[in-house]
Every structure is written in structure tokens, then in C-alpha cells.
Image (tube, rainbow, N blue to C red):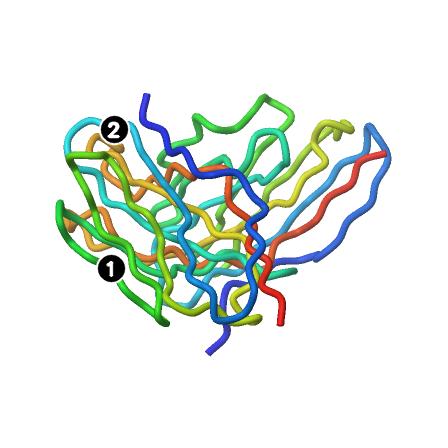
């Protein structure tokens, strides 16, 4: 079945460092791809999304490009801040999802940014 | 604007007791999701409602779990009887789904209910 694989955390960075969180997927056809972020004690929030191959999603300095050839959707940010510390989830909505946005999530990657 | 509201935020109960989790979706949304988050299994979809009707309950683990949505502004997830392995964070999420539209609408999550069954 369809699945999402993320790099294991925690990822620990200093402020202003470059961030990459790897995400690869297994799916039929062209699923929609998402990054959600979960801050401590809160629910998940949509960070960005891409719905077709070569699309780039971006928000708050974060970017991810839908790469069909490598089945990847890696999250990047050029300069992280302490406030970016959170758990990041990669997710997909399968093409054959039963007619609704049925998200399949990766395990999540915890990011800790130190001053 | 109020987001998705869940109550209680924390629940501690003893094995065998009935537990009821509550959710108020964002006004105007027509889709509601219940998720469970654990360290072992990650984030799992339990059930999906559209226009108050359960559409996909294939993720409900067993008959001990039941969910209802009596109207557009309220849903419950009930566990009876509860077991220690039900300990998890339960999230409710809502979205607005355009019938026949692309499968990419944003889901808005509540803050979750942290359940501990002793």
C-alpha cells in the first residue's frame, strides 16, 4: 500500500543553519503531498503542499519540491530559527483514496534549534 | 476565529471505564476526521465523516470504539470499555470538501486529547 518514509530524528541544529528533512513516498500515480508541523502541545498545522510533479510548495521560508523521478518531497529552509523547533510530518493523499483527502502520514521528524 | 475545539485536553481513567472525547469542528466545514497518535504507530486515521455521515470507519480498531456526529458542530469518540493500549493522543480535524473537487484541501487540527488508561 501507499506509504511515507521520513528521516529519523531528532535533528539538532544551531540557529541560522540550513535545514533538510528527507521524505520519500511509495504510491500509485501522482498523489498530493503535504508537510504538516506540530508545535509542542498543539495539533498539526499545514505548512505547505504540492499537488503535481515538479510543483514547489513554500511557506514561512520553508520549501519542498515534488520529485516524481525520485518519489521525494524533501523539506528545506535556508536559515532556521529557535521558533522552528517542532515535529514535522510528511504526508500524502493517495490517488485512489475513496474520494476524500485521506492523509497517510510519515512517522514525523523532531527538529530542535538551539541559539 | 475559533479553531477546532476538543475536550477534555487530558483524561486519566482506569481500565474498563467508558471514555468520551468531544470535538467541535470549525464552523462551515463539512468534513471531520478522528486520528490517534502513538509512539509505536504514529498518526492513524480512525474515522471520516462528511456532512455528518460516517464515510470511512476502516481505521476504527475494534468494536470498543464508536464515533458519532449528531450535527455539523459536534462529534464524539467513545471507547467502552477502555484498555491501557488505548492510551494515546486523539486528534480531531475538520476541513471543507468541495464535492468532486481535488483531493488537496487543508485539514485543520484541534489541540488533541491526551488519554491515559491505567
> Which one is closest to the eye, mark 2 or mark 1?
1
Answer above or below: position of B29 versus B65. Answer: below
Determine crowd level at label 2: few under 14, some 14-19, many 20+ residues with C-alpha closer than 10 A: some
Q: Position of residue A46 (x, y in %)?
A: 39, 59
Question: Numbered disc 1: what chain?
Answer: A
- Residue picked out by circle 1: A57
x, y percent for residue A54: 13, 49
- Residue B78 point in image, percent of width and height: 64, 38
Question: Residue at the location (47% across, 65% down)?
Answer: A17
Q: Identify the image quadrant of residue B96.
A: bottom left
In this rendered view, identify the residue nearer to me: B50 or A71: A71
Q: Is residue B49 left or right of residue A27?
A: right
The residue that appears at 49% across and 56% down in the rendered structure is A44
Q: Is residue B108 above or below residue A89?
A: below
- What is the distance, in whole Å, between disc 2 and disc 1 at their CAs? 19 Å
Which residue is at the front of the view, A23 or B40? A23
For label 1, the SS is strand
The residue under label 2 is A27
Neighbour tally class for label 1: few under 14, some 14-19, many 20 plus, Cα within 10 Å: many
The residue nearer to you, when weighing A38 against B83, is A38
Q: Which is more toward the observer, B104 or A36?
A: A36
Q: Position of residue B42 (x, y in %)?
A: 55, 36
Q: Is residue A14 above or below residue B93?
A: below
Residue A106 image label: none
Q: Residue at x 60, y 22 (%)?
A: B63
| Occupied quadrant, residue B38 | top right
Amino acid at each position: 500500500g501507499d506509504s511515507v518514509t521520513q528521516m529519523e530524528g531528532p535533528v539538532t541544529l544551531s540557529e541560522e543553519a540550513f535545514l533538510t528533512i528527507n521524505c520519500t513516498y511509495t504510491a500509485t500515480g501522482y498523489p498530493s503531498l503535504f508537510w504538516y508541523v506540530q508545535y509542542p502541545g498543539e495539533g498539526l498545522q499545514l505548512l505547505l503542499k504540492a499537488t503535481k510533479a515538479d510543483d514547489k510548495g513554500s511557506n514561512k521560508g520553508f520549501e519542498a519540491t515534488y520529485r516524481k523521478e525520485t518519489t521525494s518531497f524533501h523539506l528545506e529552509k535556508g536559515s532556521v530559527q529557535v521558533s522552528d523547533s517542532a515535529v514535522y510530518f510528511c504526508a500524502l493523499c493517495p490517488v485512489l483514496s475513496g474520494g476524500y483527502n485521506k492523509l497517510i502520514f510519515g512517522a514525523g521528524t523532531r527538529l530542535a534549534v538551539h541559539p | 476565529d475559533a479553531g477546532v475545539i476538543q475536550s477534555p485536553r487530558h483524561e486519566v481513567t482506569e481500565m474498563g471505564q467508558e471514555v468520551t472525547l468531544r470535538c467541535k469542528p470549525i464552523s462551515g466545514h463539512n468534513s471531520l476526521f478522528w486520528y490517534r497518535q502513538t509512539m509505536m504507530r504514529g498518526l492513524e486515521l480512525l474515522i471520516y465523516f462528511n456532512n455528518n455521515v460516517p464515510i470511512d470507519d476502516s481505521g476504527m480498531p475494534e468494536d470498543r470504539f464508536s464515533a458519532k456526529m449528531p450535527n455539523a458542530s459536534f462529534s464524539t469518540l467513545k471507547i467502552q470499555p477502555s484498555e491501557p493500549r488505548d492510551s494515546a493522543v486523539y486528534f480531531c480535524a475538520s476541513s471543507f470538501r468541495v464535492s468532486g473537487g481535488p483531493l488537496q484541501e487543508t485539514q485543520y487540527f484541534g489541540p488533541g486529547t491526551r488519554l491515559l488508561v491505567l
